[in-house]
Amino acid sequence: MAKRAPFLRSGFNAYHHRGLPPEDEELTRVGPGTPCGEYLRRFWQPVVLASELTDVPRRLRILGEDLVAYRDKSGAIGLLELYCPHRGTSLEFALIEQSGIRCCYHGWLFGCNGAILETPGEPADSTLKDRLFHGAYPVHEHNGLVFAYMGPPEKRPAFPIFDTYDLPGYRMAARAPTLWECNWLQVKENSMDPAHLQFLHTLPGSEGFTDDFKEHPEWDWLETPVGMVYIDTRRNGDKVWVRVADFILPNIHQFPPNADPMALRNSINRPQATTWAVPLDDAHTMQIGYYRAPEGKDMRRGTGFGQDGNRSYGERQRIPGDYDAQVSIHGGMARHGLEHLTTTDRGIIMMRNMIRAGIRAAKKGDGFDHPTLHNGAAIATYSHDQMVAGFPPAASADADRALIRKVARDTVKAAVRHGLSG
Ligand code: FES
Ligand SMILES: [Fe+2]
């Protein structure tokens, strides 16, 4: 655990605060052989949009590994180690063929499973290609995304399907990935931090969230079978608006729509996004996943306000967004020893504990389990929002806070017990 910096108790005292505590390596390092890297590799991870696989190979960096993805002319997708096993030329310059890709340097041809199919410069009786394989990872294409399994081959789980993938009355599409120039954990932690909605997302000039979010809500967090949820709860007359976001271990989140006024909500709204924070390496993270919208409503397109670093520096300083708030944490690698966590950070603490427990269980071997590791379609998730009717305000402000908190908890517990209809 990270050593904490001293809590200063008098002014003009930075002199006594200069030490930099170490990063929480167990949770932040993702390269091969690191505890967190090995944990994340046990789950299918989205690595590229299917539409990005064109007539040329696509160079990727995922979990600190350099790779190349391609779709060959037969339609099969390959994900191979980047450097040719002959003399190391990058396969981003390879030629895409009917079956596999051919290194541009001396023409070795590779299949999707890494099989070396041809070694043109070798004598005809060479058995080299019959004996050797290039490094390859299994892939699975789903609804516009290409997923990879980069863990131990004998532990490969079935490809998990979440209940939000095929919701009646909804359309779903892959969203363009964005690059976040920081460690993965501080990006993912944001998904269990509802307190920032009320501040960052309602700053003057900020776009995307309705004025309802300015009102101070009740916040709560609960464990679920797949991870945890935050609950963001506000009163509306005799109804209680319950907003629930999922964190699904190890690196997925789902959140309900945020651009419809609370008063117009009259049904259960399932999440508008399912998002993975895929570490490219310790210092770079890709947010990638799906957007969805009810039939007849516009799907969010492109990158939301403040969700990338492409605005001018001046603009980012004047109206900062999620990207600026998260990437700037301690220069891109959070030092937990410099934080002062408060009541709004209970979700962050729960989440770190869950991830740490997962990492340790994966390392130990026994006791490591998760619903997404089983062969089963429609894995239940809980993100949604709804107006719960029939709860007029309690007699005092304090009693009302307790009441809406209970309504919110009961709503989530019912969802966990019985599932969400529609
Ligand atoms: S380096 Fe790739 S075939 Fe020689
Ligand atoms: Fe946000």
Image (cartoon, rainbow, N blue to C red):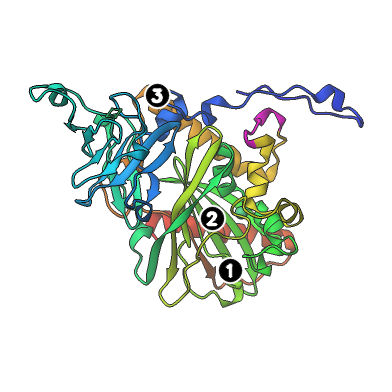
- Residue under pointer 1: 259
Q: Quadrant of residue 118?
A: top left
Q: CA distance from mark 3 to mark 2?
A: 33 Å
Is 335 colored magenta in this rendering?
Answer: yes
Describe residue 368's horizontal placement relative to residue 412 as left or right. Answer: left
Question: Where residue 33 sits in the image (x, y, percent)?
Answer: 42, 23
Identified by mark 2, the residue type is Arg
Is 262 colored magenta in this rendering?
Answer: no
Residue 136, above or below 316: above
Question: Where residue 409 sits in the image (x, y, percent)?
Answer: 54, 55
Q: Residue furthest left?
A: 125
Residue at x 54% of width, y 59% of height = 303
Secondary structure state at the residue bearing disc 2: helix
- Residue under pointer 3: 363
- Look at discs 3 and 2 and give the one toward the viewer: 3
Quarter of the render that holds ligand 1: top left
Identified by mark 1, the residue type is Ala
Question: Where residue 127 sits in the image (x, y, percent)?
Answer: 11, 22
Residue 280 seen in this snapshot: yes
First in sequence: mark 1 vs mark 3 = 1
Callout 1: few (<14), some (14-19), or many (20+) C-alpha neighbours within 10 Å?
few
Q: Quadrant of residue 265?
A: bottom right
Secondary structure state at the residue bearing disc 3: helix
Residue 150, above or below 375: above
Q: Magenta residues, as a range?
A: 332-338
Cβ of disc 3 within 8 Å of ligand 2? no
Q: How many marks?
A: 3
- Look at discs 2 and 1 and give the one toward the viewer: 1
Q: Which image quarter holds the N terminus?
A: top right
First in sequence: mark 2 vs mark 1 = 1
